[in-house]
Amino acid sequence: MLHTLFNSPGQIDLPLLKRNLREGDALLLLQDGVYAAIEGSAAFAELQTCPASFYVLEDDVQARGISGQISTSIARVSYNDFVILAVKHKNQMAW
């Protein structure tokens, strides 16, 4: 399943999101969700223990001026990569 986090980590039920992430899932952080990819943040620390693969939309990182703060353990992707993820994962859950 492809999980897409659009909202700031402080505006969602992060423990619920974490419980729904499974092996083989992907979590794409975009719009204000990119703040969850900040190295050292509470949201990053919590999500880091999940078995899913993590991605962050590069355009949204750049738009928010936080490029230097994003963890190197999270893959940066383009809109084209987003499409590839959507094709790969037939089901999607938006957060």
Image (tube, rainbow, N blue to C red):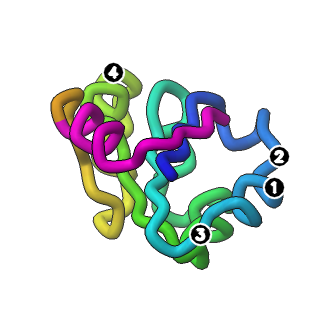
Q: Quadrant of residue 6?
A: top right
Residue that sits furthest to the front in the current view? 90
Residue at 40%, 26% in the rendered image:
64
Image marks 3 and 2: residues in contact by CB distance under 8 Å: no
User: Circle 4 is placed at which residue position?
Assistant: 63
Residue at 34%, 34% in the rendered image:
61
* SS under mark 3: loop
Nearer the observer, disc 4 or disc 2? 2
What is the three-letter code of the residue carrying label 4?
Ala
Query: Is 21 one of the magenta-colored residues?
Result: no
Marks 4/1: CA–CA distance: 28 Å
Image marks 2 and 1: residues in contact by CB distance under 8 Å: yes
Marks 4/2: CA–CA distance: 25 Å
Residue at 44%, 56% in the rendered image:
26
* Rendered view: 55 above or below 92: below
User: Circle 1 is placed at which residue position?
Assistant: 16
* Rendered view: 12 above or below 64: below
* SS under mark 2: loop
Crowd class of label 4 (few under 14; some 14 to 19; many from 20; radius 10 Å)? few
User: Circle 2 is placed at which residue position?
Assistant: 13
Which is nearer the eye, 41 or 3?
A: 3
What is the three-letter code of the residue carrying label 3?
Arg
Which is nearer the eye, 69 or 3?
A: 3
Mark 3 vs 4, N-terminal side? 3
* Rendered view: 55 above or below 62: below
User: Circle 3 is placed at which residue position?
Assistant: 22
